Amino acid sequence: MGSPSDHYDIVTVGAGVSGCEAALEAAKKNARVLLLEEHPQVGLPSHCSGVVSLSGLELLGLEAHSSFSQKLIHGARFFPPHGESIEVRKKDPVALILNRMKLDQFLAKRAVAEGVELRTKTRASKFERRADEDSLTLADGSKVASKVVIDASGAGSRLPEQAGLQAPDWAQILPGLQYELVEMKEQGDLVELFFGSKRAPGFFAWSIPTGKNSARVGLASKKGNVKKFLDDLVKEQWPRSTIDATKSGSVLVSGPVARCWSPGFIMVGDAAGQVKQTTGGGIVIGGYCGKLGGIAAASAANHNGTEAEQFLRNYDTQWREKFGSDLRKMSLARKLFASLSDETLDRLFSVLRDNVVEIEAEGDMDFQGKIIMKMLKKRNVATLLPRVAADAVKAIFS
């Protein structure tokens, strides 16, 4: 198996937000923790749009630290396929635009300061369950042993299947592309979202201000050429801007997997599908689930057999109690939304325009279930349901 130094209480795979939070919480419980990152540098490559709610940061026990903060946001402007935009604004800031690379590095340094051992350029390639300890085979052929493995390596991980679990549905990962634009017209304090079949079929495009004259502009789509869609949007909205950087990625909209634990193994973050299906955002949900997972793993490492398994089982229960209801409602909203024609979208946005005050008062970036259900119960929304159903049937057979 290797030298005694290759034996740990917990090995966490992936040094993103969920992995760093899991490693930190486990180390706080006096567990010996190894944190693996396959890339040479934590936080790179970054595929995140970098928007996080201030209430979500608070839920994670974080503040808008100067090392990763870029800009405060007061709301959003929505562009339907046709017609005037809708603005939802709050008096106080509601979100933070952040440098995701620097956030990940901030969290990794915090974990290391708590005693976590961090190894970069180290990829876990195989999980094996043994009688006393689990084994991870690394890409270089070496092995490390632990009492619990935490998979925080993102969507597409092979480890869950090796642990007898189901990975997120790869068919529900949307291709995406994002530009860092500079030399733009002056940017305000709102995120802008663009909808319609000519912009981003089945999802949406975004513009996220990062400075006075700069923004992250990107989109994801379930069909079509994302680069052509994005180039057309930039030409339409910001024709005099300059592309400073390009990042490709993907947006996970499958929802959580059915089970996130097996003996000696748990999944957190994107690997577990702990992502908002409406936006693909997973910083807050994944980070909070990482915290719960780290605490559970540390407790399991101090016990054996069925007692150890109970802590991991409890983790799966706890995070679903916190986020499960909202994720189910977001899943419903996304599936309905993805099937809508441009004409139905235009009508829906006209209804939402009449309810802006209520959305401003009760909308929550992270816990969207309440406002989704409120809007679905509106009489003028209910009158659209036959059209929504017809669009859904067309989408199935198209």
Image (tube, helix red, strand yellow):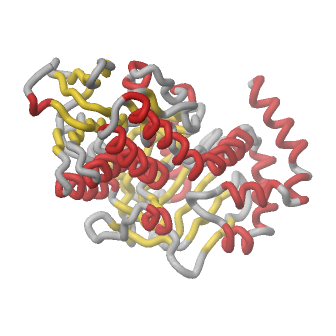
On the picture, is 338 further left or further right than 343?
A: left
Q: Look at 81% across and 37% down and name the residue there.
A: 391
Judge whether 369 appears above or below 142 on screen: below
Point out the image quarter for the N terminus. Answer: top left
Q: Look at 39% across and 19% down and name the residue there.
A: 162
Point out the image quarter for the C terminus. Answer: top right
Residues 44 and 397: in front is: 44
Residue 181 figure quarter: bottom left
* Camera sees residue 246: no
Q: Look at 85% across and 60% down and name the residue there.
A: 378
Q: Look at 28% across and 24% down and name the residue there.
A: 134
Q: Position of residue 315 (x, y in %)?
A: 47, 43
Q: Position of residue 13 (x, y in %)?
A: 30, 36
On the picture, is 281 further left or further right than 287?
A: right
Residues 231 and 316: in front is: 316
Q: Position of residue 92 (x, y in %)?
A: 53, 80
On the picture, is 92 further left or further right than 146?
A: right
Looking at this view, name the residue that lies furthest to the bottom. 91
Q: Position of residue 282 (x, y in %)?
A: 47, 49
Residues 73 and 259: in front is: 259
Residue 320 figure quarter: top right
Q: Please count the marks in the image.
A: 0
* Camera sees residue 254: yes
Judge whether 223 appears above or below 366 on screen: above
Residue 109 figure quarter: bottom left
